[in-house]
Amino acid sequence: MYGDAIDRPAHQHEPHTGSLASRLNWLRAGVLGANDGIVSVAGLVIGVAAATTNLTEIATAGVAGLVAGAVSMSLGEYVSVSTQRDTEQAIIAEERREIAEMPDVEHAELVGMLRLRGLSPDLSRAVADELTENDALRAHLDVEFGIDQQHLVSPWIAAGSSALAFIIGALLPLFAILVPPEPARIPVAFVSVLIGLLITGLLSASVARSRRIVAVARLVVGGALAMAVTFGVGSLLD
């Protein structure tokens, strides 16, 4: 019965293989980068456009914001994920040492962890024996820490995806403010940014399989507030 249920087409979309942590790392970096690119550059160019109609000044501010933001996002992601990866590698090295120096203690610990998950004492010992025989280090990392040493998060991938997403997101408000004629610049940019945030929210909700309304609302409302504030500041500084 259970074999038939697992083989049903309805389960084909579920991520039974691969690293969920790695997948979520890509999603987090991409969504955060795109959202930050759209909102920060939109706020910047709308604020400048509210203070001046000089297209060169608006373009200079927008391009500077795009470059600086992409570098900042990339560096921040690299440092953050590198710290996480270093921590995971330290845990792996420590577990490898403990398994080599005190295998009986580590085996008993694995049995105890399996019992905490609801297995009976006899079954816990049997499962621990089989897991240890197959790959003791992998078993301990998975059960104790939820770490897969074959799929550690990559700081380079996180940095690259964040920077690329930021640039793609930032190009939307930049073109939206530069292409239209002067009277329509701010309205067109405002609407374009809201549409971009709507699409970003839908994509993130689709990948994460979360509620679309919530994902879209928090991006759109936050972006609208940011643009309204910077527009007000630019108007006051005119």
Image: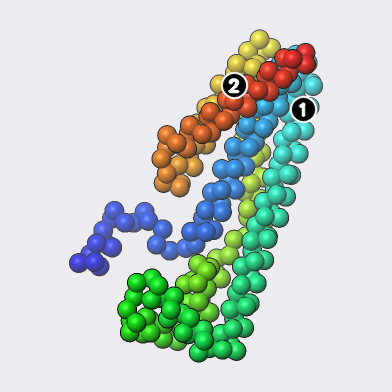
Circle 1: is it few (<14), some (14-19), or many (20+) Cα within 10 Å? some
Identity of the amino acid at label 2?
Phe
Residue 219 spot, x, y in % from top left? 53, 33
Q: Is residue 199 visible?
A: no
Q: Is residue 190 visible?
A: yes
Q: Nearer the viewer, residue 163 or 122?
A: 122
Q: Quadrant of the N terminus?
A: bottom left
Kindly identify the residue that appears in the image at 51 percent across and 84 percent down: 106
Residue 33 located left or right of residue 131: right
User: In front here: 233 or 171?
Assistant: 233
- Rendered location of residue 165, percent (x, y): 62, 42
Q: Quadrant of the C terminus?
A: top right
In the rendering, at what x and y percent does residue 237 appear?
78, 16
Q: Is residue 192 left or right of residue 114?
A: right
Q: Residue at x 65, y 23 (%)?
A: 229
Q: Residue at x 56, y 54 (%)?
A: 25
Looking at the rendering, which quadrant does residue 4 occupy?
Answer: bottom left
Residue 138, above or below 231: below
Element assignment for label 1: helix
Q: Residue furthest left?
A: 1
Residue carrying label 1: 61
**Residue 30, disc:** none
* Residue under label 2: 190
Q: Earlier in the sequence, mark 1 or mark 2?
A: 1
- Image point 64% across, 17% down: which residue? 186
The kind of residue tagged 1 is Ala
Total marks shown come to: 2
Label 2 residue SS:
helix
Image vertical order of residue 106 relative to residue 193, above or below: below
